[in-house]
Image (cartoon, rainbow, N blue to C red):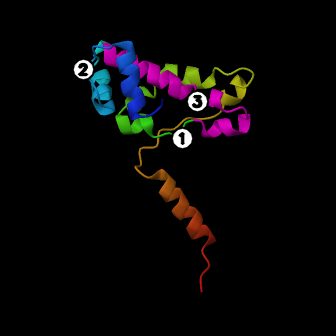
Amino acid sequence: MLSGPGLVRLALALDPRAACHEAETIAASALAREPSAQAAARLFVRLLGALPAASRSPSRRSAASTSPAGSRAGLGALLDEPQFRAAFEAHPPYQGLLEAIPTLLITCEEPGLIGCAAVASEHAVTA
């Protein structure tokens, strides 16, 4: 659900007459304060913040927001809203733990490849 197509599905579920059929268009409309796009974007942000609920292990919760879905769609400006943090932290009995974990937006297109390159360079054997 937390992908570009998921955002489109949310927008259509909330407003079947919505004209937006691309995540980027919905994000741009939400940022321009179009009501149905804003509603879809807000729900998307809450769901993205709630991702820690999918993990049963609190140690995995620190990597809760690893999906580039929101940043690629252009929702980065909405991720700073209090509703994202509220959804992120609202997982008793781990709320105190989650309050201490920062959430960051990665805007790099290929963060995984950069991380792999960094690990590879640490373990590279020089001849």
As drawn, which residue projects farthest toward the bottom? 127
Front one among 47 and 9: 9
- For label 3, the crowd category at 10 Å Cα-Cα, with few meaning under 14, some 14 to 19 and many 20 or more, is some
Give the residue type at disc 2.
Ala
Is 82 colored magenta in this rendering?
A: no
Q: Residue furthest left?
A: 19
Disc 3 residue type (three-letter): Leu
For residue 42: magenta? yes
- Mark 3 = which residue? 51
The answer to whether marks 3 and 1 mark residues whose Cβ atoms lie closer than 8 Å is no
Q: Earlier in the sequence, mark 2 or mark 1?
A: 2
Nearest to the observer: residue 31 or residue 44: 44
Magenta region, residue range: 36-64
Q: What residue is shown at x 45% (from left), y 28% (from top)?
A: 79
Q: Position of residue 8 (x, y in %)?
A: 36, 26
Dot 2: within a 10 Å radius of its alpha carbon, few (fewer than 14), some, or many (20 or more) residues? Answer: few
Q: Which mark is residue 32?
A: none
The residue that label 1 is drawn on is 66
Which of the marked residues, 3 or 1, is nearer the chain's N terminus? 3
Q: CA distance from mark 3 to mark 1?
A: 9 Å
